[in-house]
């Protein structure tokens, strides 16, 4: 299979639409700029916190968690289940901030207005007990 017929059809359509090579080049440059801005937004690191501000998560616009900070108060004051829930909340907050930034970037480059309210992510069920147990084990080893 060859892409030559598809390319020829695209070239004929471009000629029919009176698109010059200069305007096609300009459109390509504009598209590359849009893709670069979206890639930049995906690589940017966003920070999220739990409701108490004791857990801070840094995640990329693509959703990858880069760093988790547990304040001494979080470790001291929260039980395992509450600490796990705080971590999940902080990750969700970081990812929400990333989604809002990416939505704004796409709206800006597309010339559309950004939606007023980006829907919140669907809550995930998460059992923090295994993570809490791993945290307890690591803390015992550190003593």
Image (tube, rainbow, N blue to C red):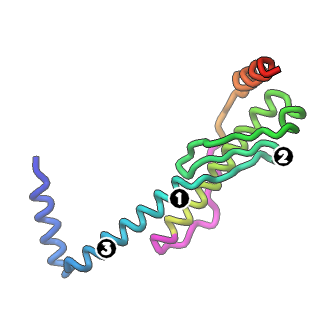
Q: Residue furthest front?
A: 143
Majority secondary structure of magenta residues = loop
| Disc ID at residue 52 | 2
- Residue 77 as seen in the image, left or right of residue 87: right
In the displayed structure, 29 sits above or below 46; it is: below
Give the residue number, with chain letter if any, for mark 1. 41
Label 1 and label 2: CA atoms lie apart by 27 Å
Q: Of label 1 and label 3, which has the lower sequence position?
A: 3
In the displayed structure, 57 sits above or below 16; it is: above
Q: Of label 1 and label 2, which has the lower sequence position?
A: 1
Give how far across and how far down residue 103 sits, in percent.
55, 61
**Point 64% across, 53% down: residue:** 46
Secondary structure of the residue carrying tag 1 is helix
Give the residue number, with chain letter if any, for mark 3. 27
**Point 80% across, 27% down: residue:** 80
Q: Residues within 10 Å of mark 3 (few under 14, many from 20)?
A: few
Magenta span of residues? 108-122
Q: Are marks 1 and 3 in contact (CB under 8 Å)?
A: no
Secondary structure of the residue carrying tag 2 is loop
Q: Are marks 2 and 3 in contact (CB under 8 Å)?
A: no
Q: Of label 2 and label 3, which has the lower sequence position?
A: 3
Secondary structure of the residue carrying tag 3 is helix
Q: Residues within 10 Å of mark 1 (few under 14, many from 20)?
A: many
- Residue 106 as seen in the image, left or right of residue 45: left
Tag nearer the camera, 1 or 2: 1
**Point 75% across, 35% down: residue:** 85
């Amino acid at each position: 299979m060859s892409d030559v017929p598809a390319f020829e059809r695209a070239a004929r359509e471009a000629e029919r639409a009176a698109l010059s090579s200069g305007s096609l080049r300009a459109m390509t440059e504009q598209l590359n700029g849009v893709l670069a801005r979206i890639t930049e937004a995906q690589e940017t690191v966003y920070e999220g916190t739990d409701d108490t501000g004791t857990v801070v998560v840094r995640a990329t616009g693509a959703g990858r968690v880069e760093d988790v900070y547990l304040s001494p108060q979080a470790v001291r004051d929260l039980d395992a289940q509450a600490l796990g829930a705080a971590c999940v909340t902080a990750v969700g907050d970081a990812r929400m901030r990333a989604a809002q930034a990416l939505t704004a970037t796409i709206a800006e480059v597309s010339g559309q207005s950004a939606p007023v309210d980006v829907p919140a992510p669907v809550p995930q069920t998460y059992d923090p007990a295994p993570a809490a147990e791993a945290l307890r084990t690591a803390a015992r080893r550190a003593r």
